[in-house]
Amino acid sequence: MHVIDSHTGGMPTRVILDGGPDLGSGSLAKRTLRLAKDHEAFYKSVLLEPRGQPGMVGALLVEPVDPSCVIGVIYFDAEAVLGMCGHGTIGLAVTLAEEGRIEVGTHRIETPAGIVTVELHDTNTVSVTNIESRRVAADVSVEVEGYGRVTGDLAYGGNWFFIADAEPIEVSTANIQRLKDLSIAIRKTCNERGIGGPQGQPVDHVILSGPSPNSDCLRRNFVLCPDGEYDRSPCGTGSSAFAACLAARGQLDPGQQITLKSVIGSAYRLSYQRGSEGGIIPTLTGEAHIMAKSTLIFATDDPFRAGIVL
């Protein structure tokens, strides 16, 4: 299996160029469901240690249904198949350019969440115009065991988010474990109580937002991913959902540009235009860098062929 690894603001993406499972034909949604239901062992083995690394997201290239798209892609982490991945799309665009499959300019990419547009500015810099994002519910309060009442917004940016203020915990690398523990507890409570999307979609990500220590950045966000790892980047789908909440509160105008940073300090520039269904169409800009070109080997006599499951 041939792969290219990149990182976007510190968050790794592994693009699978060939060697993935045959998902058949049909819509991308149907093929995504087949990957999730029938090939769990495959996608876990690609990302789990010792072959992968914590936080890594996989990007399986597939044929798009829409002929206007240069490629179709299904994203996944070690825990779940994802609807969309912002940092992964930035990494994918840089990888496609590295392979000579796209040039500087604008291109359409088909994802399970819908068609997104990428603009490749140079070797490393990419803008992603995401699917329509929206706040679903405001000021939702949950009683979190060991922490008390936590109030936040439910929002969608390609994945499902519970977004709350991190205070009194500072969003910094010194507090990653505390932020992770609180986020996991919030998500567990939301899912136990059935708090999520309007059609029963579970909360799969949590954002804990804090003030930025620098004037060049609006907020610094900690983002918990489905696999229990934190996003080293500011999270593209999370930034989209976060901007939708700001817009819904009248705190961000169409075309106004802001900068959001991750817990490790990497940044996305972000703006939006109004959507057609009451949400926003966000555009985020970040940088990705190629790290490796590899051939993954799955030897039958390897005792950890399927990865290390703890």
Image (cartoon, rainbow, N blue to C red):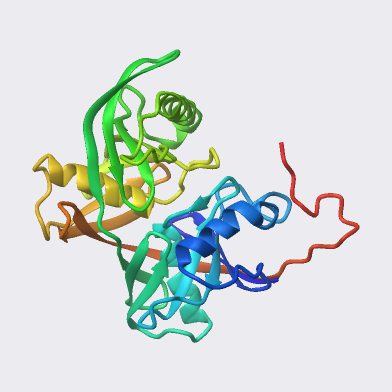
Outermost residue on the right side: it is 301
Quarter of the N terminus within the rendering? bottom right
105 left or right, relative to 19: left
Q: Is residue 30 above or below residue 230?
A: below
Q: Residue at x 31, y 68 (%)?
A: 127
| Image spot of residue 156 (x, y percent) | 31, 46
117 left or right, relative to 87: left
Q: Residue at x 30, y 25 (%)?
A: 167
| Image spot of residue 273 (x, y percent) | 15, 61
271 left or right, relative to 161: left
Quarter of the C terminus within the rendering? top right
Q: Residue at x 42, y 77 (%)?
A: 123
**Residue nearer the viewer, 155 or 193:** 193
Q: Residue at x 47, y 33 (%)?
A: 176
| Image spot of residue 261 (x, y percent) | 33, 48
Q: Is residue 228 visible?
A: yes
| Rendered image quadrant of residue 89 | bottom left
